[in-house]
Amino acid sequence: MKWMRRSVLLLLPMLLAACQNGQELRPTCELTAITQVESYLNNPKGFEGQFTQTWPDGGKSTGRIVYEPGKLRLNYEYPAPMIVVAKDKRMVAKDFSNQSVTHIGLSRNPLGLMLKTPVHLSKPILVTNIQHKNGFLQISLASSDNPSQGLLTLLFIDQKGLLILKQMQAVDVRQRRSIMDLENIQEGIQVPASYFAYPDGQG
């Protein structure tokens, strides 16, 4: 048994290298990529950074993103101030330009796929595509119960196994595409639990 464990440990770097170089061993590469993404999204330290969002109509917004496992907050700064908090199967957005509040369920929203607690990229989540080459890892997710409800694609920079989220792309049930490009990502954030309170004051 010892020699078997030793052989596996010696083989692991070779398998990882094969994945990075886009060679064969696709099942092993996919399993490695899935494990990497799960670890990233379940990291209790979370991350924060800046984003530029391109809406389906081509309009753009900018702001700040904060993520912890199961929780997401978006502080939109341009073109109008807005706060969006997503957690617990629902998303609440407050537009401060007119004080309107919008409630959206996450069960049929692609964003809900990355806000499970913890994230397991297996049922009820379906991994529809994985691409891993040239220092990038891209993974597409859908609901295994109803894939047509939407698709979420996450693009990571892969620095020798260390992932940094670079882009989130969501396609909803109407095939409308929204792209969020991220930059200046910092991990190990510390924010109070109240930071993820819904902006309508209801939790």
Image (cartoon, rainbow, N blue to C red):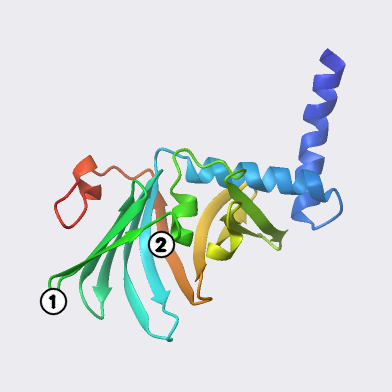
| Residue 105, percent from left and from top | 36, 57
Bin the neighbour count of mark 1 within 10 Å (Cα to Cα): few under 14, some 14-19, many 20 and up.
few
Residue at the extreme bottom: 58
Q: Is residue 101 left or right of residue 51?
A: left
Residue 184, labelled with which disc?
2
Q: Which residue is at the front of the view, 81 or 110?
A: 110
Asked if the residue at tag 2 contacts the one at tag 1, i.e. Cβ–Cβ closer than 8 Å, the answer is no
Instruction: Tell me the element at label 2.
Output: strand
Q: Which amino acid type is shown beneath numbered disc 2?
A: Asn
Query: Residue placed at 21% from the left, 49% from the top?
Result: 197
Question: Which image quadrant for residue 132?
Answer: bottom right
Query: Residue placed at 86% from the left, 17% from the top?
Result: 3
Question: Which image quadrant for residue 147?
Answer: bottom right
Query: Residue placed at 52% from the left, 54% from the top?
Result: 164
Q: Which amino acid type is shown beneath numbered disc 1?
A: Asn
In the picture, the quarter occupied by the N terminus is: top right
**Label 1 or label 2, whichever comes before in sequence order:** 1
Q: Is residue 105 left or right of residue 180?
A: left
Which of discs 1 and 2 lies nearer the camera? The answer is: 1
Q: Which residue is at the front of the view, 27 or 174?
A: 174
Residue bearing mark 1: 98
Instruction: Tell me the element at label 1.
Output: loop
Quick check: can you spot residue 83?
yes
| Residue 149, percent from left and from top | 53, 63
